[in-house]
Amino acid sequence: MSRFQQIKQPAEGTELSAIYREIVDAGWVGAEPGVPCNVVTAFSERPDILRAMWAFTKGTLMSGVLPPTVKEMIAMTVAVQNDCRYCSVAHTNALEAMGVPTRVIESCAGDPEFAELPPTQRSLLKFALKAANDPKSVNDADFQSLRECGLSDGEITEVVMTVGCASFLDFFAEISGVKPDGEEEASSPDVEAGRHGTVPAN
Amino acid sequence: MARFRQIEIPERNSRLAALYQEIVESGLGTDHPINWFTSQGERPDILEATWQLTKGLLFSGQLPPTVKQMIVVKVSMQNRCHYCRVLHTTALEAMGVPAEVIDNLTTDVNLEKLTPPQRAIVRFGVKTAQDPRSVTDDDFETLRGHGFDDGEIMEVAMVAAFSNFINSWADVSGVEVDAGP
């Protein structure tokens, strides 16, 4: 359950409905068709804040020059690092939808050496983890390792900003307390009762 | 030492020039934007995204601008980000916040010189910035007790997250404190 009100069907013509349409068109859909995912609807009390977050997300996580799969891998690794279940599930689903093999996804999620990844992606994810965990620990040698992989400074900027955006989303998912999309139904009182073998008295 | 080239003059790049003008007009720079932004000058697409975020979270909203800057200063101290601490302390001074209040904000764990709502907001911001998972329903209740609604509580949390974000770019990019005007 989210700590913030989640408006799923905003009135037509409102600022919220306009942003929702844009977000749904970008593919960020939750369990219900045409409704954005929970980390988005949890912003519904403040369309102005959602507008700012979406502009930032579009320009960092959702676009740029790095391959979309690599950016999702970064977001996945950062979500696991931040112990954010909502975002780990969401980024896993996104990677699966992109056709990334399961062993690669598992390597992003649980292997600090990223052994299943090619060398460039491995360097990139190690850099991303450092930037997420302790930005002060990033040093010139870390930059050099990415430059040796052929990354330009503009691309390194994109890596850091992708990390920043992923951390932001992790943060809001944790603060708001949203559940992974589709899990709300599974934890409704009726299902809980069924799971524990109790039958409502009536 | 900055790790990225800081582009101060957006030659023949009209997109960058327009962004720079808007950033300077907001007060974040004089002849050109502050180093935090010019270090992103090679990527106007990204600069535009970070500027939209800055405008939406720091320069607009419902909370008083001073208390938002207080959150940024305090979180920057927590993250030991010298660049952001200096910049946002200067912002508080420019807003006319008395020196004794700024001094209290940065030195007194009890935040005695802040008003009770300011104190509650700054504490919530610092806590969420350090560990968003540590936030409890009681923390929300405390802010509601000071009259803040859920949308305003969201704004506090987002300014705290924003502070972490700007600290991380300042640290990774290695920008140095801007020279005074």
Image (cartoon, coloured by chain):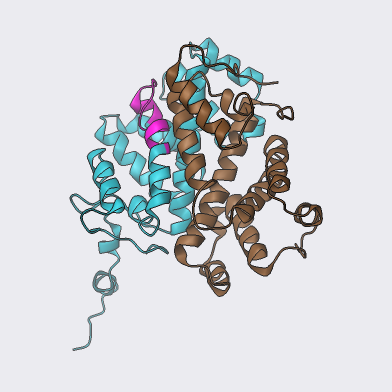
- In the figure, residue B115 lies in which quadrant? bottom right
> Residue A66 lies in magenta, yes or no?
yes
* Residue A125 appears in the rendering: no
Residue shown at 80% from the left, 52% from the top: B99
Where A124 falls versus A173 (above or below)? above
Of residue A11 and residue A4, the one placed in the foreground of this image is: A11
Q: Pinpoint residue B45: horizontal percent, then vertical percent.
A: 42, 25
Residue shown at 59% from the left, 27% from the top: B33
Q: Pinpoint residue A27: horizontal percent, then vertical percent.
A: 25, 40
For chain A, give the colour: cyan
Of residue A116 and residue A131, the one placed in the foreground of this image is: A131
> Residue B112 lies in magenta, yes or no?
no
Q: So how many labels did they put on this image?
A: 0
Residue shown at 37% from the left, 35% from the top: A58
Chain that appears brown: B
Looking at the rendered image, the quarter that the C terminus of chain B falls into is: top right
- In the figure, residue B143 lies in which quadrant? bottom right
Where A190 falls versus A53 (above or below)? below
Q: Pinpoint residue B110: horizontal percent, then vertical percent.
A: 76, 64
Horizontal arrangement in the rendering, residue A55 relative to residue A18 (left or right)? right
* Residue B18 appears in the rendering: yes
Horizontal arrangement in the rendering, residue A198 relative to residue A47 (left or right)? left
Of residue A181 and residue B43, the one placed in the foreground of this image is: B43
Residue shown at 80% from the left, 58% from the top: B108
Where B136 falls versus B77 (above or below)? below
Horizontal arrangement in the rendering, residue B95 relative to residue B168 (left or right)? right
Looking at the rendered image, the quarter that the N terminus of chain B falls into is: top right
Magenta span covers which residues?
A56-71
